[in-house]
Image (cartoon, rainbow, N blue to C red):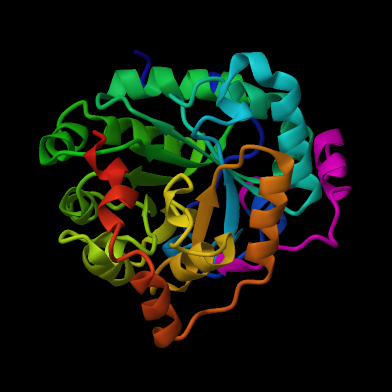
Amino acid sequence: MPKRRNLLMTGAALVSGLVSAYPLSRWRQRRHGSPNLSANAQAARELPTSAVIPERVLGKTGINIPIFGLGGAGQTPLGQRDRTAEAITLIETALQSGIRYFDTAASYGHSEVQLGKVLPPYRSNLFLASKTAQRDRDGAWRELERSLKRLNTDYLDLWQLHHVSFLEEIEQVTGSNGACQALNEAKDQGIVHTVGITGHHEPAVIVAGLRRYPFDATLIPINAADPHHPRSFISSVLPVAQELNVGVTAMKVPAYGRLLKPGRLTSISQALGFSLTQPGVHAAVVAAANPTQLQDNIRAAQAFRPLSESEQAAIAALVKDNWQESSFYRDWT
């Protein structure tokens, strides 16, 4: 396995460190330099500006990202090879409706390929995240190269270790020839700009990862069921992320729709509002089954306002009797 992956690098060398918040387009120019706009960059400027999603600074990265992004997981058109036309419609709807943050993974079926069919002309104005489930350096590199090819891009804004569930995995990824070595090398070479860790099984494992390695970001389940769990991500991971200024994106916001069943939360606005109000959370990603559902989610994000403590407590109370059913993903490893 070659030490460097120069075949993947294009453009100017990257400078390290960010001292202030930058919107995506200005951050691209700062990182890459852009004396002449490419055809792709010109196309990116044509994205609509009327559909705006609020932004927040993603922790210590200094990058302004939208508070809401489209998730590529789940049983949606993005992940299925035989639903390409639906996937393309969904992605195009996302772009036209203001989505600039896309989250996918090497293991999300056909998701990377579907995104790679649509996103390249707009790439310079997007925040694109993917993940690797490999725990060793060489395996992670191979998966990164495949992800870049499938996404039809030469860099990722965020590359994450996927569904880290056990303390033994923290030892493995941070050890000799562990996946964190690939994170270091890819980040040093500018192939990935920021790195993260994700997990939905055990918050203590994510805390251990944040303490062990200087991740820029984490993707964790933050929803109205979480406070009822005896091992809460909100109470255990968020304080550490804030201490270390790690960017946090919430996932499992509606718990695959289980939090929106009759007698529970009444809308995606409640679910998203609860997640985005939690201290230290910068954004949320939610998958969508169709354009109508996606646009409902986007409208909720556009109308977001921080909730009061009493409003948060009222929302959490709505799921106190069924939080276990809504936390089924905690069993996944």
Q: Residue at x 38, y 64 (%)?
A: 224
Residue 36 picture location, percent across and down: 84, 43
| Residue found at the very far front of the displayed protein | 263
Q: In the rendered image, is residue 152 in sight?
A: no
Residue 119 picture location, percent across and down: 72, 34
Given residues 87 and 30, the one toward you in this image is 87
Residue 269 falls within the magenta-colored stretch: no
Q: Is residue 222 left or right of residue 76?
A: left
Q: Quadrant of the C terminus?
A: top left
Residue 106 picture location, percent across and down: 46, 25
> How many labels, in total?
0
Q: Quadrant of the N terminus?
A: top left
Q: Residue at x 55, y 19 (%)?
A: 7
- Looking at the image, is 103 positioned above or below residue 116? below
Q: Residue at x 52, y 79 (%)?
A: 306
Given residues 238 and 292, the one toward you in this image is 292
Q: Is residue 279 left or right of residue 128?
A: left
Residue 20 picture location, percent across and down: 55, 70
- Looking at the image, is 198 positioned above or below residue 183? below
Q: Residue at x 16, y 29 (%)?
A: 176
Q: In the rendered image, is residue 268 in sight?
A: yes
Residue 35 falls within the magenta-colored stretch: yes
- Looking at the image, is 10 positioned above or below residue 224? above
Given residues 68 and 328, the one toward you in this image is 328
Q: Is residue 77 left or right of residue 232?
A: right
Q: Which region of the structure is painted magenta? A: 31-56
Quarter occupied by residue 39? top right
Quarter occupied by residue 263? bottom left
Q: Is residue 101 left or right of residue 51?
A: left
